[in-house]
Image: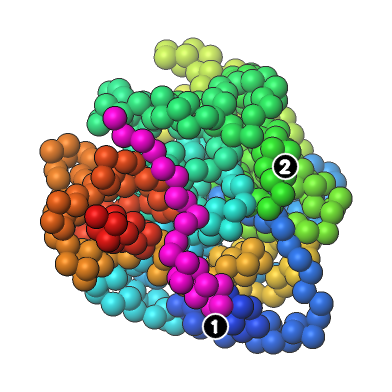
């Protein structure tokens, strides 16, 4: 029978004093040495503001609207007919390129914003193996795919409460970038396991499938039931809006869908029991703010990106406005105090949406706002929602088109729909033509995105996406580079340096275990967890054990515990 010893915040006294001293030394230094040249600009801005009074920041709320170009927010504002909550926060722009491309995927974009490092396509929370973007420093071969600390992990080490929220599966690329370290964004079961063992206080979104065994695409194949683990860890597991709003727990895991949650406009018709993004944000803030040490909260409006991929303006508007309502909740909290920094940003553009198209080449000076907005106002559901109502025999196709705002249909539109081999494509093309909208692509785009901030010492200017991680870390009182030496060290190198041998137990192929031996002392560190079995006891470590496929990376603390166990015998 193993006993569990929690040592999340314990390190050797000498090392603790060294870290404290180093923190004090870096407090007055400008933020330099990032992978990108923009950090020099950030350092310059820091120098300019040295004379200003730096206010204490206790809480950080990081909000990302995935795949949102400025054209989408502009369209949503016109549709709403009033200013967005975001508008009063506009403070600059962010460059989004990855280590290998001018146009980023969500995984390296989230990695950049969470860890301060540019990375590669599909990589989550690890260093790149390919670097060819100008201004990005190459990574030494031995450090390629090395996990790097994210701001949520740093906040946990500071004693702060943490939370992640998304309207996608919670294991999706962007929330994963703030909570996990894997080689591919599609490894949902691994991401889910790492999230469960990160000790995050609030987790709200979809993604039930990756927590339980089953035959689905993202179900667990290792037969571990992480729902049982979550319950054992003391979470209040909630699966409906009402259960979430009633919860009084300080630890809540909300699982509102097997995969993604409903788009906001569709929710009343398709999933009325799901909470809105704003409701999840408000509940998270109410719960996390009980912590006297403060909190870090990550919030994603996940599905603007998906609507943009489909060139669906209704879906984009639906999700931008839902995200903006969540921003309003964060602002409402921040405005009542002076210790909370709110950052809102997109991770990248998508679709190249334009208000205006070839039809308005000659008429744009005289084309009123109503010509773009009124056709959109007729829609009752997004493209995804409308098509979910289509019967297998397509006998209600015209009714579905009307749900999407194509009402009444012209003879030409009816013919195009009846002859369509791709209804998704045809529906959005017909609506875009009515609303005079243009799209250049069905994929991501590489333009700078707008930055929105509120609170003390808010960043103002043009930044690299990597700068945001360092800004948040510095605001919360830690340095990501220092923590990388603490949370993720090469296990083989570190243990062999103290005379131990390491091997990998692959008895369970889905869950390899690092085995460390020296004399009669044996330690086991299972992948994707923060636990270490040593001397018939189980220790909870301050960081995850991550396997890159070539080597294990462990918290330095694991080495200290192994040494301590040896010396006490």
Give the image location of residue 334, x and y in percent: 80, 52
The picture places residue 274, in percent across and down from the top left corner, at: 62, 24
What kind of colouring is applied to the model shown? rainbow
Residue at 43% from the left image edge and 65% from the top image edge: 12
Badge 1: few (under 14), some or many (20 or more) residues near its Cα, within 10 Å?
some
The residues colored magenta run 1-22
Mark closer to the observer (1, 2): 2
Mark 1 highlights which residue?
A: 32
Q: Is residue 278 left or right of residue 1?
A: right
Helix, strand or loop at label 1? It is loop
Using the image, tell me which numbered label, if any, was put on residue 290.
Answer: 2
**For residue 369: magenta?**
no
With 477 as the anchor, is 521 left or right in this view? left
Viewer-side residue, 186 vs 262:
186
Q: Nearer the viewer, residue 334 or 353?
A: 334
Q: Are marks 1 and 2 in contact (CB under 8 Å)?
A: no
Residue drawn at (47%, 51%), measured in percent from left and top?
8
Residue 509 placement, left or right of 335: left
- The answer to which image quadrant residue 41 occupies is bottom right
Give the CA distance from mark 1 to mark 2: 34 Å
Q: Secondary structure at mark 2?
A: loop
Q: Residue at x 61, y 73 (%)?
A: 463
Q: Residues within 10 Å of mark 2 (few under 14, many from 20)?
A: few
The answer to whether 58 is drawn above or below residue 447 in the figure is above
Does residue 9 show up magenta in the picture? yes
Residue 321 visible in image: no
Residue 361's x, y, as percent?
66, 60
Q: Position of residue 506 (x, y in %)?
A: 14, 43
Q: Nearer the viewer, residue 439 or 491?
A: 491
């Amino acid at each position: 029978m193993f006993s569990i010893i929690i040592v999340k915040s314990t390190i050797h006294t000498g090392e603790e004093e060294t870290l404290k001293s180093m923190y004090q030394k870096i407090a007055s230094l400008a933020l330099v040495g990032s992978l990108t040249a923009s950090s020099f600009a950030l350092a310059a801005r820091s120098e300019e503001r040295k004379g200003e009074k730096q206010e204490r920041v206790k809480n950080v709320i990081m909000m990302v609207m995935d795949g949102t170009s400025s054209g989408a927010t502009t369209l949503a504002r016109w549709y709403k007919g009033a200013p967005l909550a975001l508008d009063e926060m506009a403070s600059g722009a962010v460059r989004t390129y990855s280590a290998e491309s001018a146009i980023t995927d969500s995984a390296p974009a989230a990695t950049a914003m969470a860890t301060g490092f540019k990375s590669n396509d599909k990589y989550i929370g690890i260093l790149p193996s390919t670097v060819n973007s100008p201004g990005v420093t190459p990574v030494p071969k031995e450090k390629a795919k090395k996990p790097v600390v994210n701001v949520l992990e740093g906040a946990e080490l500071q004693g702060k409460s943490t939370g992640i929220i998304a309207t996608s599966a919670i294991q999706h690329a962007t929330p994963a970038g703030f909570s996990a370290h894997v080689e591919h964004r599609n490894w949902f079961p691994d991401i889910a396991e790492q999230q469960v063992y990160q000790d995050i206080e609030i987790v709200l979104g979809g993604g039930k499938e990756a927590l339980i065994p089953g035959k689905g695409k993202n179900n667990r194949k290792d037969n571990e039931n992480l729902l049982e683990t979550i319950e054992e860890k003391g979470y209040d597991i909630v699966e409906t809006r009402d259960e979430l709003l009633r919860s009084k727990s300080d630890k809540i895991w909300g699982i509102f869908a097997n995969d993604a949650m409903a788009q906001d406009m569709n929710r009343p018709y398709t999933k009325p029991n799901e909470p809105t993004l704003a409701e999840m944000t408000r509940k998270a803030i109410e719960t996390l703010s009980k912590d006297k040490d403060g909190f870090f909260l990550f919030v994603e409006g996940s599905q603007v990106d998906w609507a943009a991929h489909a060139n669906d303006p209704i879906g984009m508007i639906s999700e931008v406005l839902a995200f903006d309502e969540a921003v309003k909740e964060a602002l409402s909290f921040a405005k009542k105090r002076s210790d909370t920094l709110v950052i809102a940003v997109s991770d990248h553009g998508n679709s190249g949406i334009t208000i205006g198209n070839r039809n308005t080449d000659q008429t744009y000076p005289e084309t009123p706002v109503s010509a773009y907005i009124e056709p959109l106002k007729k829609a009752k559901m997004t493209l995804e929602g409308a098509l979910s109502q289509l019967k297998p025999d397509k006998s209600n196709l015209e009714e579905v088109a009307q749900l999407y705002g194509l009402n009444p249909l012209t003879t030409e539109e009816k013919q195009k729909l009846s002859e369509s081999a791709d209804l998704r494509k045809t529906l959005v093309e017909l609506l875009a033509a009515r609303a005079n909208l243009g799209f250049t692509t069905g994929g991501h785009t590489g333009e700078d995105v707008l930055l929105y901030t509120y609170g003390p010492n808010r960043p103002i200017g043009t930044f690299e996406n990597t700068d945001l991680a360092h800004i948040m870390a510095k605001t919360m009182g830690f340095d990501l580079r220092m923590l990388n030496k603490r949370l993720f060290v090469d296990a083989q190198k570190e243990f062999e340096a103290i005379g131990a041998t390491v091997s990998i137990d692959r008895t369970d192929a889905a869950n390899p275990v690092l085995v460390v031996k020296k004399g009669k002392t044996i330690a086991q560190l299972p992948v994707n967890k923060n636990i270490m079995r040593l001397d018939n006891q189980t220790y909870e470590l301050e960081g995850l054990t991550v396997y890159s496929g070539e080597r294990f990376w462990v918290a330095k603390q694991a080495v200290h515990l192994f040494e301590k166990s040896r010396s006490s015998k």
